[in-house]
């Protein structure tokens, strides 16, 4: 379970990373990132059914589905330009991750973590 929590945090951090957007677009990041995002492109370590929900009050929930089971990790985030800082809680432990947003539109989020791992998400319509 700790492995999945670490993977969930990595994904969340990657999702929040920003880099190539124009300065004007970065002002909209706080509004655009709010919502539920489903992973569409990932590496082998990232679970298939990963969803990240960002709220207006800077909280997030990472949900990982495996078969009929799902578990969630709660946390918070800060957004400074294209830099997304994610803090997830695993019981009594907290893990910080720094991501860079490479692309953030109304329906697409691409992030890169500090190790260069890139993940892509699509905004859920629910």
Image (cartoon, rainbow, N blue to C red):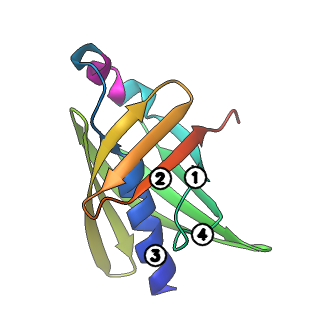
Cβ atoms at labels 2 and 1 below 8 Å apart: yes
Location of mark 1 (residue): 41
The image shows residue 121, relative to residue 26, as above or below, that is below
Location of mark 4 (residue): 47
Which tag is nearer the camera, tag 2 or tag 3? Answer: 2
Cβ atoms at labels 4 and 3 below 8 Å apart: no
Between the C-alphas of marks 2 and 1, the distance is 6 Å
Residue 40 shown in magenta: no
Location of mark 3 (residue): 5
How crowded pointer 3 is (Cα within 10 Å; few <14, some 14-19, many 20+) is rated as many
Mark 3 falls on what kind of element?
helix
Mark 1 falls on what kind of element?
strand
Q: Quadrant of the C terminus?
A: top right
Q: Earlier in the sequence, mark 2 or mark 4?
A: 4
The kind of secondary structure the magenta stretch mainly shows is helix
Between the C-alphas of marks 4 and 3, the distance is 10 Å
Q: Which residues are magenta?
A: 25-29
Residue shown at 42%/31% (left/top)? 104
Location of mark 2 (residue): 119
Which tag is nearer the camera, tag 4 or tag 1? Answer: 1
């Amino acid at each position: 379970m700790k492995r999945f929590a670490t993977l969930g945090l990595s994904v969340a951090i990657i999702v929040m990373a920003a880099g190539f957007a124009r300065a004007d677009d970065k002002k909209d990041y706080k509004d655009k990132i709010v919502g539920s995002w489903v992973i569409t492109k990932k590496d082998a370590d990232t679970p298939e059914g990963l969803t990240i929900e960002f709220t207006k009050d800077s909280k997030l929930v990472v949900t990982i589905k495996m078969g009929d089971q799902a578990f969630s990790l709660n946390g918070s985030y800060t957004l400074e330009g294209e830099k997304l800082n994610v803090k997830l809680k695993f019981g009594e432990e907290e893990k910080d991750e720094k991501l860079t947003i490479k692309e953030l539109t109304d329906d697409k989020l691409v992030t890169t973590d500090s190790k260069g791992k890139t993940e892509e998400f699509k905004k859920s319509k629910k």
